[in-house]
Structure formats: C-alpha cells, structure tokens
Image (cartoon, helix red, strand yellow):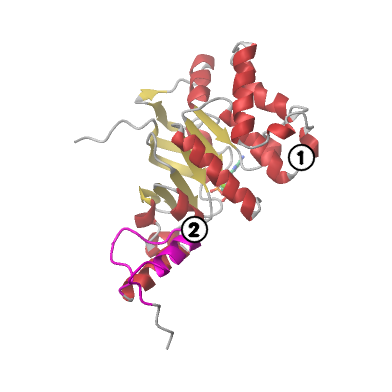
Amino acid sequence: MSEPTALVALRGASYAYEDGPVVLDGLDFDVHEGRALALLGRNGSGKTTLMRLLSGGLRPDRGRLTVEGTPVTYDRTGLTRLRTTVQLVVQDPDDQLFAASVGQDVSFGPLNLGLPDAEVRARVDEALAALDITALADRPTHLLSYGQRKRTAIAGAVAMRPRVLILDEPTAGLDPDGQERLLATLDGLRASGTTVVMATHDVDLALRWADDAALLTPSGVRTGSAPAMLARTDLLRQAGLRLPWGIAAARLLRSHGLLTDPAAGPRTPDDLAALASAPGTEPLPADG
Ligand SMILES: Nc1ncnc2c1ncn2[C@@H]1O[C@H](COP(=O)(O)OP(=O)(O)OP(=O)(O)O)[C@@H](O)[C@H]1O
Ligand SMILES: [Mg+2]
C-alpha cells in the first residue's frame, strides 16, 4: 500500500539566507495528518528555518511546498490559503505579539480573514479558553509574564483553527507546571483533530509527547517513530542530543527482565512508578 499523501510536505527544498550558509539542501519533509511530530537538532541546524518554510514565511530557493499534494503558490491567495492550513508560533512571543491587549492580539488573525464579528468572537473565546487565559483577555500584552505571553502567542495561532500547528520550542522558558499545562492543551488540540509539530531540544519531552521524531543531522533529516529514533545513539550524537532517560530506564528494566514488551517503556516518572508497582514485579537489585 502506498503512503498516504502528506498534509504538508517539502520536496527537494533548499534554502540559504542572503549572505548566509546553505541551511537546507534538497530536503524532503512530510507532515502527516494526525501525527504529533517532534523536530530535534543542534543549535543552528535549521529547525526554525524548516518551520518557516513549512508555514510559508520563507520560500525555498529550489524545490516546493505542497498541501495535500498541491504546490503552494506564494501570491496573496495562495498564502492566505496556506495560513488557514498551517500556523507557526515563533520561539520568542515578543516577535509575535504586537496588539495592545491579549484579546486584540488573538483576534487579529481571524479579523484579517474577513470573518463576521460573531465568528471572530467565537474563535477568540475558544482559543483563550484552550490556552487557559480567558481571564487575561483585557490585559495589556506588555504587562504579561513570559509564560503568559507565550500562551497568548499560541492562542493567536489556535484562533486561526489551523489543520497544522507548528510550535518553535514552545516549552522553553516555561516552568514545570506551565509545561504540563501546555502539553495538556496540545493534547486537547490533537484530540480535536489538529496536527501538531514542535521543535524542541528536550528529548524526554519528545519521547513522551511525539508519535514521530525528525532529527536534523549534518547528513540530512531522519524521521521515524519517536521511540525508535530517540533510541538511535548514533543519530542523537550527530544531532547534539543525549539519550532520553526513558529509553535508558527501559534498557535497564529489560536487562533485569522487568520489561518484556519490546515497544513499551516508561515515558514519565509516573509510568516508571507504575511499572515498579505492577503485580509480579521484583524490586530492582541493588548496584554492585
Ligand atoms: N535571518 C538570518 N540571516 C542569516 N542567517 C540566518 C538567519 N537566520 C538563521 N540563520 C542561520 O541559518 C542557520 C540555521 O538557523 P536556524 O535558526 O534555522 O537554526 P535552529 O536549528 O532553529 O537553531 P536553534 O536551536 O538555535 O534555534 C544558522 O547557521 C543560522 O546562523
Ligand atoms: Mg530555532
């Protein structure tokens, strides 16, 4: 059976910034509908550049961007259509927020689509609720904390009801509770059909959250199921990443006969505790 057509894809895409190095060269990259995708790689490996190509903010020098197999045109109509399909949330919320208040900022995109007022209001209310910032609707954006600005930036993208939401390092700078709340929000969006792509340096988060992982290495991008990719020590090293603790823990558990299912390993400390307290589990022998 042939692979289903990717929702959004780059084919043979190359990109170099003016007077800059070639960042991506002949890249093929697929975003499949309904799959949570983590994008990982060293600083400067091209994650942000790739995300900007996927969302139409940058145009490939060679190659093409397609939505459901149809090449994107970079005129007004084509880019508007792309914006209703793909939304990018940039890493620094200060690069995204510009309106005076939270509510105004989140309503900007839907207003710009020319939607009726009632529809704009419904989308803004929904996005504020999804990001748990309804109470901040009238707050001036310049008075928000960093985590609140981050949530506002994400709400602005969510209000566009994109099919693909692309987030550039969304958990960076959030406290542990903020990270948990964001993951819960993303789970909610995924459950309602949004495809989510996230760039992150956090291998533990990627293992826990993603279905698939794409590693940007000097020899190109390698994509596969997250548990398989994040166990590839060779690729992780090339991508400047370490082994997720969940993979290391699964190896230890297997070597002690405490984990027999080849696929299942702990993804969170709670998973590990559940494994340890499962009926018939012997306590781990002491070291030495
Ligand atoms: N506006 C720009 N002009 C020139 N070069 C740029 C520009 N933006 C990025 N670059 C260069 O392109 C390369 C890829 O950068 P990019 O921001 O895509 O990497 P990244 O993987 O997102 O890194 P990080 O993990 O630090 O966010 C780097 O060498 C960077 O210096
Ligand atoms: Mg980046």
Instruction: Assess disc 2: are there few (<14), some (14-19) or many (≥20) residues with their C-alpha within 10 Å of its C-alpha.
Output: some
Identify the residue under disc 2: 204
What is the C-alpha distance between the residues marked 2 and 1? Answer: 29 Å
With respect to residue 161, does 258 lie above or below?
below
- Mark 2 in CB contact with mark 1 (< 8 angstroms): no
In this picture, residue 177 sits left or right of residue 21 = right
In this picture, residue 93 sits left or right of residue 13 = right
Q: Is residue 279 magenta?
A: yes
* Residue 141 visible in rendering: yes
Q: Which residues are magenta?
A: 257-282
Q: Residue at x 60, y 29 (%)?
A: 127
Q: Position of residue 269 (x, y in %)?
A: 49, 63
Identify the residue under disc 1: 144
Q: Residue at x 63, y 24 (%)?
A: 124
User: In the depicted view, which residue is nearer to us: 251 or 126?
Assistant: 126
User: In the depicted view, which residue is nearer to us: 67 or 265?
Assistant: 265
Q: Position of residue 55 (x, y in %)?
A: 51, 31
Q: Quadrant of ligand 1?
A: top right
In this picture, residue 3 sits left or right of residue 217 = left
Q: Amino acid at mark 2?
A: Asp
Give the structural element (helix, strand or loop) at label 1.
loop
Query: Magenta stretch mostly in which secondary structure?
Result: loop
